[in-house]
Image (cartoon, coloured by chain):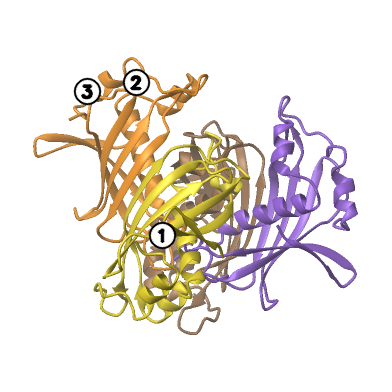
Chain colours: A yellow, B brown, C purple, D orange
Amino acid sequence: MGTFREEGEHWWHVHDLRVRYADTDRMDMVYHGTYAAYLEAARVEMLRDAGWVYAEMESDGILLPVVQLNMTYKRPGRYDAVLEVWSHVTAPPTSKLSLVCEVRSQGGELLVRGEVTLVFVDRATGKPRRAPQGFTEALNLHHLIR
Amino acid sequence: MGTFREEGEHWWHVHDLRVRYADTDRMDMVYHGTYAAYLEAARVEMLRDAGWVYAEMESDGILLPVVQLNMTYKRPGRYDAVLEVWSHVTAPPTSKLSLVCEVRSQGGELLVRGEVTLVFVDRATGKPRRAPQGFTEALNLHHLIR
Amino acid sequence: MGTFREEGEHWWHVHDLRVRYADTDRMDMVYHGTYAAYLEAARVEMLRDAGWVYAEMESDGILLPVVQLNMTYKRPGRYDAVLEVWSHVTAPPTSKLSLVCEVRSQGGELLVRGEVTLVFVDRATGKPRRAPQGFTEALNLHHLIR
Amino acid sequence: MGTFREEGEHWWHVHDLRVRYADTDRMDMVYHGTYAAYLEAARVEMLRDAGWVYAEMESDGILLPVVQLNMTYKRPGRYDAVLEVWSHVTAPPTSKLSLVCEVRSQGGELLVRGEVTLVFVDRATGKPRRAPQGFTEALNLHHLIR
C-alpha cells in the first residue's frame, strides 16, 4: 500500500516501510543488500495500487525476474526509521520493465537510488514475452510511466 | 562439508562456517534469526557427508520442512568468526527427524543450542510419510543417531 | 503499528505485515527462519503502541537481546499474504521479558506459534538488569501482561 | 578462503560457496538480493587471502561501506549448487575501491556479474580517507589490480 505523489512534472508511487532490526548490520545501518528487498516490496505495492497484483500474474504463468539492479548509496538508513520508497517506470514496458526508485528519509533526504530492470517471462517456456495485456494501461492510468 | 567427531560416548557432525557481514545486526553480533540458516546449512552438510543429498530427495518428491525450532542463545556470535555447528540426530527417524545442534566458537564455547524437528512430506499429496529407505541406515552408518 | 484486541479474557497486540518475495524459499512458503524477524517487528510495534520505543531504550544504554526462541510451524505462510502477528507478555517483566506470539492468516488460521524470552542488558557493563522504570506500567496499561 | 587463478592475461580471486535453502525464493532460484551477501563474502576472502583482514581494519577504525552496487543477472543460481565468485580490483585504490565480480557455476557459466564500489571511511570523523598503508601493496602482490 502506498500513495501516488506528484513531484515536479512527474508522478511517483511512494511506499513507506519501517527498518527492522534484522535489516541492520554491525555498521549500525541498513545492510546494503537489504535494499533489494525494500525496492521489491515497494514495486509490488506500486503495481497493486495501480490495480495489478503481481502474485496473480505469477499464478497466471508470467514471471518477472530482475535482470539488472543498480544501487547507489548516498546516506545510511537507520534502525527503526520509516523510509519512503519512491518509484516510477522509466519507459513503456516491452518485454522489459524498467524502474527508478529512490529511498528517502521522512525528512526528504535521499538515502539510496536504485535502477531496476525486470523481464516478463513465460513460465511454461522460460522465454521472454511481452508485458501482459492491461499492464501498461494500469501504469498509464496513474501516470507512472515517463 | 564437515567432519564426524566423537565427544564423550557420542558422535557429532561438525560443519564450519564463517560469519558474514550480512549476518550481523546493529548489536554487533549475529542476528538471532540468522542461526536458523546456519543450522539448516549444517544439517544439509551432515546428510551429505552421510551420503544423503537433501536436494536429490526433494527432486524425488520428498520434502522435509521444519515443524519445530527451539534456540537458546548463550553467547553472541561475532563478525568474521568461524563457527562450528555440531549436529546429531536424537531418535530413529519416523515421519519426523529430530536433531540437536550446538553452535560453538572455535575455542569450544557454546554460543547457541538448537533443537530442530522436521517432518518428511510427500510433495504430491502434501501428507507426512515415513523417512525414505536408506535414510536411517545412512545416519546409523556414521553413528549420528542416539 | 498495530491494534490491541481482546480475545477470550485476554488482550493481544496485533501487527499486520505483508510477506515479501525475499521472505520466501523454494518450497514456495515463508522460510522458517524469516519468522524471527516477523516476531521481532511485531514485538517492537507492540511496545511502540504501548508507548515504549525500543530504539530509544537502546539509545539510553539498555539492550534487549533474545535469549530463547521457540517456534512451532503449523501451516505455511504464503507469498503476498498479509499475516497477523498476535503478541502478549506472559509474566511481569523482571530482568527477563517473555512473550507468546501467534502468526495467523487473515482468515484466522494459526500458522506459527512462537515463545520468545529476552533479557534486559546494561550496555555499559554487559550485565543483566531489571526492566527499566515505566516499562511494566506501559504494558499493564494495555493489559498485555498475563 | 579461496584461490588465485589466472584467466587470459589477468588474475582473479575465486571463492566457492554453497547455495543455502535460506538463499532461495519461490521462483526456485537464488533471490536476487542475496548476491550482495555473496559478493561481500567473496570480497572479504579475497582480502584475507591477500593478507588483509577486513575485520581488523574495522577494529583499527577504518570502515569500507559499499557506495555503488550494480548486478546483472544472466542465469539463475540454484539451490545446493556450489557457486564460484571470481573477483578482482579494477583500479588502484584511492579513497575508493572498485571491483568486478563474476558469479559462475562450477561448469563455468556466468550467472551474475557485479560491479562494486566501496569507500574507505574514518570511523572517528565519518569522512572518506585514503586506503590504509599496505592495502594496495597486498593486492598488487597477488596481481589483483588492473
The residue labelled by disc 2 is D131
Q: Position of residue B100 (x, y in %)?
A: 60, 54
Please state, as top left, top right, bottom left or bottom right, where the N terminus of chain D lies in the image. Answer: top left
Q: Amino acid at mark 3?
A: Asn
Q: Amino acid at mark 1?
A: His
Give the residue displayed 79% in from the left and 51% down from the top.
C98
Q: Which mark is residue C128?
A: none
Q: Quadrant of residue A137?
A: bottom left
The residue labelled by disc 3 is D140
Looking at the image, residue D2 lies above or below residue C23 = above
Q: Position of residue A75 (x, y in %)?
A: 48, 37
Labels 1 and 3 share a subunit? no
- Is the residue under label 2 in contact with that under label 3 (CB below 8 Å)? no
SS of the residue at dot 2?
loop
Comparing marks 1 and 2, which lies closer to the viewer?
A: 1
Q: Quadrant of residue C129?
A: top right
Q: Which is nearer the N-term, disc 3 or disc 2?
A: 2
The residue labelled by disc 1 is A88
- Would you call the spot at circle 2 few (<14 residues within 10 Å), some (14-19), or many (20 or more)? some
Q: Label 1 marks which chain's residue? A: A
Most distant residue in the front direction: A9
Disc 1/disc 3 C-alpha distance (Å): 43 Å
- Would you call the spot at circle 1 few (<14 residues within 10 Å), some (14-19), or many (20 or more)? many
Looking at the image, residue B76 lies above or below residue C146 = above
Looking at the image, residue C65 lies above or below residue D132 = below
SS of the residue at dot 1?
strand
Q: Label 3 marks which chain's residue? A: D
Disc 3/disc 2 C-alpha distance (Å): 13 Å
Q: Label 2 marks which chain's residue? A: D
Q: Position of residue A40 (x, y in %)?
A: 45, 59
